[in-house]
Image: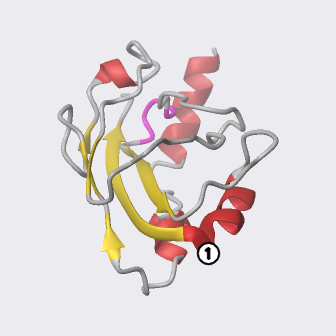
Amino acid sequence: MQTSIMRTIGHALRNVRPGPMLLATGRLSGSLGYALRVSSPAFGDGQPMPVRFTQDGDSVFPPLRLRGQSPRGYACGRNALGRPGWTAPTPPPGHGPHRYAFQVFALDARPGFPYPPGRALLMRTIRPHIIAQGRMIGTYERV
């Protein structure tokens, strides 16, 4: 029953999307001098993600490659569910393709957080330290 309800909601909201301006890169100033190129050997930018990277598959984080600033470490904030780390995509059935952004930021300092920050705190804290950024979009659709 829950699946049929989700499918009905998915069809009703099929064309509703938040848009790329909600991505942090859409709101940052254009004064950054460096870009990071984010790619994946598993799928191209704007292309469908293989099912193994979704909750319909193995829920593994897709392999990403970076070109640009040389990373010396990384940290992950909270995901859309408020949990630290990766939560694989699971859009409502019948809602059409959803976009998933993989955003990467190179910083001139590593901020300290007592816990994995939410998006607002993360962006407010790292904004003055961003020296390069990049993103890649993957899509996934459940029929």
Between residue 65 and residue 109, name the one nearer to us.
109
Between residue 42 and residue 112, name the one nearer to us.
112
Q: In the rendered structure, which amino acid carries the disc numbered 1?
A: Pro
Residue 64 horizontal side relative to residue 41, left or right: right
Between residue 6 and residue 108, name the one nearer to us.
108
In the depicted structure, whether residue 94 falls above or below residue 19: above
Answer few, some or many: residues within 10 Å of disc 1's Cα (few below 14, many 20 plus, some between 14 and 19): few
Q: Residue at x 47, y 31 (%)?
A: 89
Query: Could you say which quadrant of the image residue 6 lies in?
Result: top right
Residue 4 horizontal side relative to residue 64, left or right: right
In the depicted structure, whether residue 51 falls above or below residue 84: above
Q: Residue at x 64, y 18 (%)?
A: 2
Q: Quadrant of the N terminus?
A: top right
> Is residue 13 covered in magenta?
no
Q: Quadrant of the C terminus?
A: top left
Q: Residue at x 78, y 39 (%)?
A: 115
Q: Which residue is identified by label 1?
A: 128
The total of numbered circles placed on residues is 1
Whole-percent x, y for residue 80 in the image: 63, 42
Q: Main secondary structure of the magenta part?
A: loop
Whole-percent x, y for residue 48 in the image: 25, 38
Residue 47 horizontal side relative to residue 106, left or right: left
Residue 114 horizontal side relative to residue 132, left or right: right
Whole-percent x, y for residue 109 in the image: 59, 61
Start-end of magenta stretch: 91-95
Whole-percent x, y for residue 97 in the image: 36, 43
In the depicted structure, whether residue 75 falls above or below residue 31: above
Between residue 113 and residue 135, name the one nearer to us.
113
- State the colouring used for the structure image: secondary structure
